[in-house]
Image (spheres, rainbow, N blue to C red):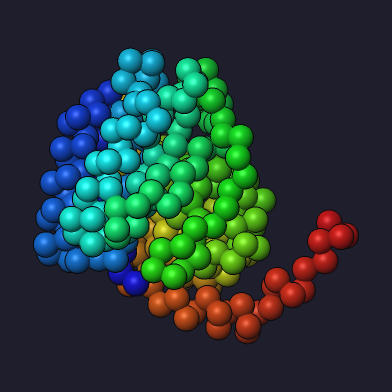
Amino acid sequence: MKYAIYQMDIIAGKPSENRGKVKEWVEKTMESISPDILVLPEMWTTGYNLAVLEEVAEENGQDTVPFLAELAKRFNVNIIGGSVANKKNDRIYNSSFVVNRLGELIYEYDKIHLVPMLDEHLYLEGGKKKVRVFELDGVKMGVIICYDLRFPELSRELALQGAEVLHVVAEWPTARKEHWHALQKARAIENQMFVVSCNSVGEYNNVEYAGMSMIIDPWGSELSVGKEQREETIVNDVSLDLVAKIRKDVPVFSSRVPELY
């Protein structure tokens, strides 16, 4: 299964310009690489210009879902659609959309954990639904958003549901880049699954974003790591047979004693 990850420099507060960038990237990537799955970063339509979200947030995914669906169907590709500012019932959520090759929306997730260090809780509403797995090309997968990575219970729940790949879409700051690196490796090793992350680059409101998008295998080996502070495309194949092998060789899940935790 081949991945292409867009480590994007987001234009803050400009949804139409960012959709133009993504459209151009998808067209070039599909022509030159032809991956199975595309991955976008967190809040890719607006960036962290939180003060203008009330004006620029979309209603119920009405802009992003058709946009991603058209690209997915046109190019016969699955899309992990990062996340966007999404207004529902007069509340703004940080919502991720997953679209399959047929252009069907198969999963929607609202970020549960809001970042106090970036004042997300002053502008956004935390998600209220539990995470669950979805399937792309017959593979069970999950998605979490940025700060969610710090809460191991979330990734473990997806692993217990059978996820073989965890996607982490983010705008993770350079100030905490060592945590970004270490936490992804930990989630991959402890859950014996691939971790595929897409982070942004650039700077807004004195916050610099780290890049370093990654593909980490279930043994914790780094298959690909993006550069810091450079917009680029990260490409790699993942061999999903490795998940079953490692789960058999090191039987973490059958060794669990949850009633004692």
153 displayed left or right of 34: right
Frontmost residue, 102 versus 157: 102
Q: Which quadrant, please, contains the N terminus?
A: bottom left
Residue drawn where x is 39% and y is 68% of the image: 137
Q: How many marks?
A: 0
Relative image position of residue 154 (x, y in whole percent): 62, 50
Q: Quadrant of the C terminus?
A: bottom right
Query: In terms of depth relative to the viewer, which is nearer, 55 or 145?
Result: 55
For residue 95, what is the image quadrant?
top left
The relative height of residue 191 versus residue 18 in the rendered view (above or below) is below
**Rendered location of residue 96, percent (x, y):** 42, 42
Residue 234 visible here: no
For image coordinates 86% across by 60% down, the residue present is: 259
The residue drawn where x is 34% and y is 26% is 58
Locate residue 258 relative to residue 1 in the image: left or right.
right
Q: Position of residue 240 (x, y in %)?
A: 45, 76
